[in-house]
Amino acid sequence: MKISPQDLERDFYAVLGVEKSATAKEIKRAYRKLAQEYHPDKHPGDSAAEEKFKEISYAYDILGDEEKRSDYDEGRKLMAGGGFRFGPGGQGSAGFGGGGFPGGIRLEDLGGFASFFDMGGGMGGSSQRGPRRGRDVETSLTLGFADALKGVTTTITTRTEAKCASCNGTGAEPGTLPVQCPRCYGSGSETETQGGFGFVRACTQCGGSGQIIEHPCAGCGGSGIQVRPRNIKVRIPAGVEDGQTIRLKGKGAAGARGGPAGDLYVKVKVAPHPIFGRKGADLTITVPVTFTELALGANIRVPTMEEPVTIKIPAGTRSGRTFKVRGKGAPKKRGGQGDLLVKVDVVIPQKLKAREKALLEEFAELHDESPRVRLDEYMKD
Ligand SMILES: [Zn+2]
Ligand SMILES: [Zn+2]
């Protein structure tokens, strides 16, 4: 049997009349005493007693089992903390059938209670005074072309809610500490009994934090939070692309009252390079060549981000052809390196010396192969 959301709404400790901190022995003793008291054999025909007996047995089924009890305790703590809640106002099970959460998410889908930490109170309304997750913060960072390829560790300054520097986020005046809430004994939740069932709600004295601050910190007024500039060390992975956003978990604004920090989203801008372009993990370069280099073939020196390489251009290469230099691109996310794509582009001389002109004219006369055969055919019709 798994702990269901309905189970979390009930206070089994209250059912058995024990403290939350009760030992396994104390729980067993309390159960035995109540079970004897309400045993159906003692109350023939009394359906109220029978219901009570069933409830006692159910409560003991959970609290009497170490693993179920710890699951139950953890779920209750999260629920009281405002991470999620069931039904209106966090109490009552009305309109809440089939073991589902509002929105149709089932506990099983979330892989257990630990998931609720990750969800950071995004589900349902969070209680006004309970722990609250810090907000996500967005910032941008401009990197040089080469730095984006290599990856960098840099410092970003953001002005956000941060843990108060004087009380280190406790909200209590330095030298003092928050004390356990006397109403809920630090659990943050309290039980309201309705029709023999215990329903849980956030503690009305501490608001669900489980703690009371007797001497609020002067630096933050007891909130534990200050808005101030923070320097955050950021490691940008090698091969980051222009426009990519990097998420730094827990580096956003500080949470309130023990809630987790939000995330920091860093949008990366990569400065253009004067020579190289980039297409994902490939770098691109356009290399100007002469007509004769393509016609006769040539060896051409081409720069890369590292050492230059020599590309062999075969005779008869058409203009616009792309050559691939393997492994001279950007680092790929999953290891390896992209390529350098070298595109050759014919440049026509703007001025010709007399001799050059004469030779070209001679070439033109000799070269009677039209490059427009297909177009000529087309125009014949
Ligand atoms: Zn403070
Ligand atoms: Zn309390």
Image: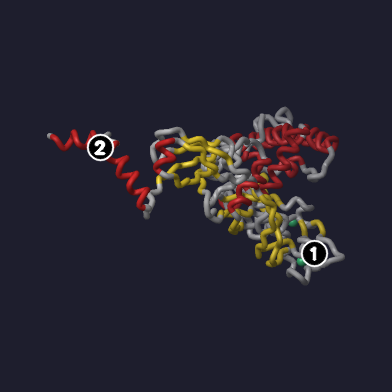
**Residue at the outermost left position:** 381
Which image quadrant: the C terminus? top left
Query: Closest to the observer: 249 or 210?
Result: 249
Corner quadrant of residue 168: bottom right
Mark 1, ligand 1, within 8 Å: the answer is: yes
Looking at the rendering, the quadrant in which ligand 1 lies is: bottom right
Say which residue appears at 81% left-offset and 37% top-offset: 27
Q: How far, Cα to Cα, is label 1 from label 2?
A: 82 Å
Is residue 22 found left or right of 345 in the rendered image?
right
Q: Quadrant of residue 44?
A: top right
Relative image position of residue 152 (x, y in whole percent): 67, 51
Q: Looking at the picture, which amino acid does disc 2 mark? A: Arg
Measuring from the top left, give residue 341's x and y in whole percent: 50, 40
Can the viewer see residue 192 in this picture?
Answer: no
Task: Check if mark 1's residue and mark 2's residue have beta carbons within 8 Å.
Answer: no
Which residue bears the numbered disc 2?
A: 372
Mark 1 / mark 2, whichever is N-terminal: 1
